[in-house]
Amino acid sequence: MRASELRFRAAFADAGIGMLLIDTDGLVLEANPALAEMLGHEVAALVQMHINDIITPEEGARRLYRELVIGVRDRLRLERRLNHREGREVWSSVTISLIRDSTGTPLYTLAMFEDVTERRRLGDRLAYQALHDPLTRLPNRTFFFDKLNDACAPRPNTEGATNGRRVGICYVDLDGFAAINDTLGHHIGDQLLSAVAARLERGFASGDRQLVARLGGDEFAVLVIDSEGSEQLTALAGQLLAVLERPFEVSGHRLSVTASVGVVERPIATTSPTELVKDADATLYWSKADGRARWTLYDRDRGAHQLTRRLLTTALRPALERGEFTVEYQPLVGLADGAVHGAEALVRWRHPRFGTLSPDRFIPLAEESGAIVPLGRWVLEESCRQARGWLAEFPDTEAFVSVNLAARQVWDSDVVTDVARVLDQTGLPARLLQLELTESAVLGPSGRPLQALQALADMGVRIAIDDFGTGYSNLAYLSRLPVHALKLDGSFIEGFRDPAPVGRPEPRSRRSEADEQIVGAMVRLAHDLGLTVTAEGIESAAQAERLRLTGCDTAQGWFFARPGDPSLVSAILREGRVRSSGPEWSPAVS
């Protein structure tokens, strides 16, 4: 026994790890030099200390230690912070074992300490790097989402209830930041981002209530936990804009930046972290689209509209493959003779969920996504096939079909080849096809669009400028374009109102007289250039008559006929002239 005790004491004293022998009351009976060195004490100073003076006490650890000394457990392992004599941080992996006598009664506990301070510091550094942006030192996207998830989680003491708690996000994006990188270099851009981050953190990080994070690139976010309402968030957004508008001094450059802010605030019970971030991102996009250097509060109706736009954009190409599109035709009526000279092809989408959609609902989406190219090609084929049918049934009328052509069709496809192929397949003479392009698409810089239009005109196809008067309005440019017709925008026709009722004569408004003078001047100019003129949006006999008196050639609108299936045009061609849907109108009235 004596030899065993000597060996134990030798091992205890010479061990490379810290060791303590502690009685059941928690008082240190013996300590070894390794532990004394670890804690900056002399061995004698450790003896008679209480274990809680050495290991930072924590209620959970205390409970486990009490279970150990009364014999409920035989061993305890934990990682705890030790109290160094100089106050510096020492972390140790601690193993405490119970020593019993021959009867099993607890006598002592033996504690062994392994210094893990460096490992702990390395782990802390790695954890910090994983949760913070290396450039700005702000919390990163991962940290932000962790805090957002915590903010939206039920509180443990409320049994899963949210008790009316709210949360808000200000999603910030610098306006025109790419231009700074491109002109001054990325090193200046990085310094600017660091300066922006410092200003945001200094002004808006507030303990556990507000977190400022960099989400990536030039995007930042302020998370408001337990917010008080949308007014608080919009006020915060205004402060963000004001703070960022102050110039930054970066490496000798005085830089002024603005920001766009998307604001979302709502009760936790009605949302999720994913929805919050998605809506904040959408709202930031609205701020950019609305002019930048502003904040925008999330609007549920606008969000629903954007969602519908995305759904329609995604469904465009499959809908074309499923045959959900159809073409309606609206007659183009001669104001001098009342006869149908042609018809405009208007595409409709028979959507299985949203019903029949007019072109203004999906054509802009098709142009943005590129689906306008296959859709426009299909409309062209359908329209030319139908016009060839009218020619076969009414060979003397030679009614043409007018098809809208998007600018992207000219740029993204070989429209000349497409038109030639369709005319060849359908057998429609080129003179009975009119292609309508908007003024802004035609009256721009010369190049590919102009070359394509000239090739189409040389082929014999009629070219019309749609919505004339709303774009560049470069009248001198008309003489150099291969154009055959102008279609006046409907806004010019609004002034052609009905005359005052009989017995209550009233002078015509200045708007009405001005519109008639403008339309008359455009008609005369067009005729001098050898062009015909079509007016859109005719809703009354008075409008039709006044337009006839200006010399306008053809017109279309609900007064003559609403868009309909091909049989509508066939019936009018069969009858020889249009019957107006309103009061009787005769082109012979002067």
Image (cartoon, rainbow, N blue to C red):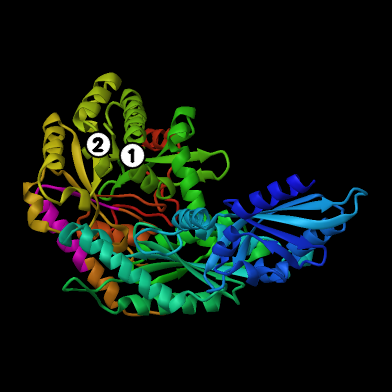
Identified by mark 2, the residue type is: Asp
Circle 2 is placed at which residue position? 412
For label 2, the SS is: helix
Q: Is residue 264 magenta?
A: no
Of 298 and 502, nearer the camera is 298
For label 1, the SS is: loop
Of 346 and 5, nearer the camera is 5
Q: Is residue 522 magenta?
A: yes
Q: Which residues are magenta?
A: 517-535
Q: Quadrant of residue 270?
A: bottom right
Of 22 and 565, nearer the camera is 22
Left or right of 287, for residue 258: left
Precedes in sequence: disc 1 or disc 2:
1
Instruction: Please report the residue visible at 14 percent of the width from the left and 48 percent of the height from the top.
Output: 531
Circle 1 is placed at which residue position? 370
Of 327 and 361, nearer the camera is 361
Q: CA distance from mark 1 to mark 2?
A: 8 Å
Q: Residues within 10 Å of mark 2 (few under 14, many from 20)?
A: few
Note whether 214 is above or below 233 in the view shown.
above
Can residue 108 be seen here? The reply is yes
- Estimate the x, y position of residue 247 in percent, counting from the top left: 25, 77
Q: Quadrant of residue 381?
A: top left
What is the residue that sits farthest to the right in this orientation?
103
Can residue 469 be seen here? The reply is no
- Estimate the x, y position of residue 284 in percent, counting from the top left: 42, 62
Asked if disc 1 and disc 2 are in contact, CB closer than 8 Å, the reply is yes
On-image quarter of the C terminus = bottom left
